[in-house]
């Protein structure tokens, strides 16, 4: 029987393979990197806000059991620890079912392009992959699970969704990056760093940089929000059912209150100018930030659907997520509390046997949790092996964020944040920065 091809050997891809093995189906995991969880390794210095028990998939745990592996029980691992203590052993247990250095460049139906209906569902999938030497291969599959993630598609600094003028030049000059900085290095001490973004990654960067600021006088940190309101930037605090996620936002808020961070709102970057080895951000309204030694852009990620041009997809026009998932996670839609777990029925596309899971299933939306992905692959694999009852069953209740999930009024200042059931955040102690000259 043909294998089920899984694209990506990250947390959800490896979990999907474990579920397939447990169900008696044969997976083939294609990973572009040279080892498991290649993307996670790149942010290995970052500590997760999910505890260990929520970072290990159930079927993977059962697969690893006979090897003598012991599941970590307590604490919050870094990305590097997640790889070394769980994901790498899982990949090793899967053996040659995981193929590294194999980048998927196309998915389609054998003998049928996108426009052909006749006999389409009776034909196997064909997956085109290319190794680092350029050698290509064509793999037939009975189903495809895309768990390739969004790591290689970071959002730009430009507020219109396109790179700001000069953004590419700033990156080429080594002044701009799209990753949470490693504050353990000395390069940020005594320097000026601008962080662009309002999500958990941005809050993590602010907390880490604030620690540098405490140790080293003269360190300057500017936090840039596009929205005109602070809103739920600092999260749900004690109301968040993931305690470390709630604490993260409160630590970032404290850094602002302590004067370690200059917070600038309503700043939508249009241009980045280079000045003597530093970068200055210019907003659409003409405001100019003081030139920075480092610019860290943490504005989310986007799914890469370029290699799926011959697959019939049902994607939301705003988020580029499966349409039934998008209605749950769309930040434009007001939603208080947690989103519901998603399964095979939500992740299905018009192309029978094709599923997008993991962070990519959220498209451009944030707040994806490993727990979500593990439930997704459990349901999808059950559907693929014909256990429709298990596929429809929901075995996960996602933790409440403790905040309203709607974006509110994008241009509104805090005191006019209409349209939110939670009302404006308490910003009485915050220092809202004003842009200075470069």
Image (tube, rainbow, N blue to C red):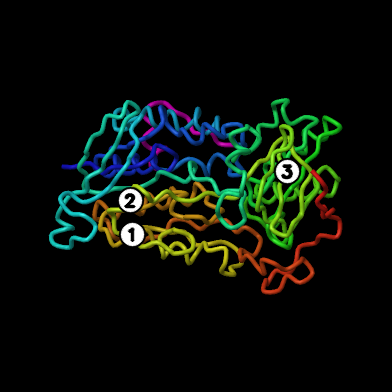
State the residue position of label 1: 313
- Residue 348 image offset from top left, x and y in percent: 33, 59
Q: What element carries label 1?
A: loop
- The question of residue 62 being in magenta is answered with yes
Identify the mark nearer the N-term, 3 or 1. 3
- The residue drawn where x is 39% and y is 37% is 9
Q: Which residue is drawn at 71% across and 39% down?
A: 279
Tags 1 and 2 in contact by the CB under 8 Å rule?
yes
Q: Which percent across, then down, holds residue 327?
A: 48, 67
Q: Nearer the viewer, residue 38 or 392?
A: 38
Residue 15 position within the rendered picture, expressed as x and y whole percent measured from the top left: 39, 41
Q: Name the residue under label 3.
A: 280
Q: Comparing marks 2 and 3, which lies closer to the viewer?
A: 3
* Residue drawn at point x = 15 percent, y = 50 percent: 111
Residue 109 shown left or right of residue 316 in the figure: left
* Disc 1/disc 2 C-alpha distance (Å): 8 Å
Give the residues in magenta: 59-74
Q: Which of 88 and 205 is in front in this view?
A: 205
Q: Distance between the residues labelled 3 and 1?
A: 40 Å
Q: Read off the residue under disc 2.
A: 308
């Amino acid at each position: 029987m043909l294998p089920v091809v899984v694209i990506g050997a990250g947390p959800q891809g490896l979990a999907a393979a474990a579920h397939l093995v447990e169900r008696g189906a044969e997976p083939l995991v294609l990973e572009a990197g040279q080892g498991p969880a290649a993307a996670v390794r790149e942010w290995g210095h970052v500590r997760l806000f999910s505890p260990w028990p929520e970072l290990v998939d159930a079927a993977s745990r059962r697969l690893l059991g006979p090897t003598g592996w012991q599941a970590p029980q307590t604490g919050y691992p870094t990305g590097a620890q997640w790889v070394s203590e769980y994901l790498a052993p899982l990949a090793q247990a899967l053996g040659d079912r995981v193929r590294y250095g194999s980048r998927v460049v196309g998915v389609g139906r054998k003998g049928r392009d996108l426009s052909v209906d006749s006999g389409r569902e009776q034909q196997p999938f064909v997956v085109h992959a290319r190794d680092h030497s350029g050698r290509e291969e064509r793999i037939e599959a009975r189903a495809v699970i895309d768990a390739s993630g969004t790591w290689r598609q970071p959002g730009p600094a430009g507020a219109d969704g396109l790179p700001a003028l000069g953004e590419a030049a700033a990156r080429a000059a080594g002044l701009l990056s799209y990753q949470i900085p490693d504050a353990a290095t000395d390069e940020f001490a005594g320097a000026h760093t601008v962080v662009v973004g309002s999500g958990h990654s941005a809050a993590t960067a602010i907390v880490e940089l604030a620690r540098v600021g405490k140790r080293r006088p003269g360190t300057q940190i500017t936090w840039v929000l596009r929205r005109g309101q602070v809103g739920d930037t600092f999260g749900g605090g004690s109301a968040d059912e993931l305690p470390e996620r709630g604490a993260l936002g409160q630590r970032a808020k404290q850094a602002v209150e302590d004067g370690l961070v200059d917070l600038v709102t309503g700043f939508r970057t249009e241009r980045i100018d280079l000045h003597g080895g530093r970068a200055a951000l210019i907003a659409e309204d003409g405001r100019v930030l003081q030139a920075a030694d480092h610019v860290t852009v943490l504005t989310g990620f986007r799914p890469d659907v370029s290699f799926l041009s011959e697959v019939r997809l049902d994607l939301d026009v705003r988020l580029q997520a499966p349409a039934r998932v998008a209605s749950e996670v769309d930040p434009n839609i007001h939603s208080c509390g947690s989103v519901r777990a998603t399964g095979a029925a939500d992740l299905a596309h018009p192309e029978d046997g094709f599923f997008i899971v993991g962070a990519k299933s959220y498209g451009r939306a944030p707040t994806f949790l490993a727990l979500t992905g593990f439930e997704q692959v459990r349901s999808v694999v059950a559907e693929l092996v014909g256990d429709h009852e298990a596929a429809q069953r929901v075995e996960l209740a996602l933790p409440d964020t403790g905040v309203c999930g709607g974006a509110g009024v994008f241009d509104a200042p805090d005191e006019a944040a209409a349209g939110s059931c939670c009302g404006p955040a308490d910003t009485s102690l915050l220092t809202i920065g004003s842009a200075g000259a470069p």
